[in-house]
Amino acid sequence: MVVPTITPAPSFNPKEDAEALRKALKGLGTDEKTIIKILTNRTSSQRQAILNEYNEDRDLIKDLKKDLSGNFEDLVLALMTPMDRYLATELHRAMEGVGTDEDVLIEILCTRDNHSLRNISKAYEDVYGKSLYLAVKKETSSDFEKLSWICAAAIGQRLQTTHMAPSCQKLYRAGEGRHGADEDEIRRILANCSFETLRLVFELYRKETGNTFGEVIEQELEGDFKKGMLAVYESIRDTPAYFAQAIHKAVAGTGTNDRTLIRLLVSRSEIDLHSIKKEYEVIYNKSLEKAIKGDTSGYYEKMLLALINE
């Protein structure tokens, strides 16, 4: 069972929260602690209700931008953006300009359920006036274009039942005893089977062959397609572990990828961030709290810690 870190606040009163935020932003100095306390203890939909209440008199986003700066501002604005629109914007940023950030495409498109993907796709079209499916298809190339088919085709199309279990066993046959995997069959199944079904198939494969399907991908595929397929496999097989590793990648080494760190914590906070936090400690023998404290500072750090309930 996956566990979030943010759940709906009981006895929620958007008017009281809007008034508290107005007070925190009014006059000389800013009450960052109040901003952190309110925004990290409200769901995305509750934050939107606060924004609507606040905007009856003033513009909350404008006031926040005026009083905040740096990574703390970026984190607050991410929290105040409707989640579907926020993720649509992150997808657009990953595809605009020269080159494509395939990691972001995989992270968002290949780990979300039908409902989320449909909403993200709609938000993308509302903001940018074009189809997310066509944008993904256009902006990916070379070997990764094979994987983009999985991501794009999965937008609102992935089955959410286990009824395809018999046909999904073809995934097992696509790699077993072959010299070169059946890439077309693997792509088709990963794009259309539910995560629940795929986990069953992965387990079946391991029992039947003694190997994981990840090992097949390692041995039979290559290049960006191999990299992408491994990410898809890992995110489906164990979602909290996948995101724990993604967070570690954002904070490990010299410098911090703050945009990625913000996106991961904000977007998973209402889904499975508590589970990710526990998995992080298991994998790295180090708490996520300690990792964040080692790479961030100030109110930005305090808000990130509040997001993970520390």
Image: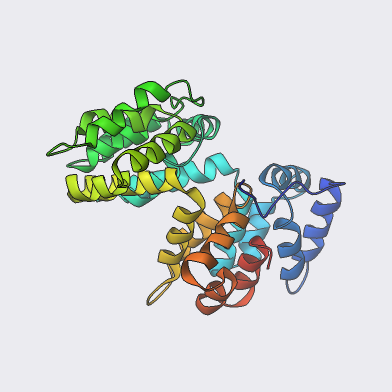
Give me the residue at 83% from left, 55% from top. 19
Res. 265 in view: yes
Give me the residue at 64% from left, 48% from top. 270
Residue 234, image x and y in percent? 39, 49
Give me the residue at 80% from left, 52% from top. 18
Residue 73 drawn above or below residue 48:
below
> Which residue is nearer to you in this view: 163 or 99?
163
Residue 32 drawn above or below residue 151:
below
Res. 97 in view: no
Residue 96 drawn above or below residue 309:
above
Tell me: 308 left or right of 216: right
Quarter of the rendering occupied by the C terminus: bottom right
Tell me: 156 left or right of 81: left
| Residue 75 occupies quadrant | bottom right
Residue 117, image x and y in percent? 49, 33
Give me the residue at 68% from left, 58% from top. 63
> Which residue is nearer to you in this view: 229 or 259?
229
Residue 294, image x and y in percent? 52, 79
| Residue 182 occupies quadrant | top left
> Which residue is nearer to you in this view: 140 or 272?
272
Rendering colour mode: rainbow
Q: How many marks?
A: 0
Tell me: 53 left or right of 88: right
Residue 156, image x and y in percent? 46, 27
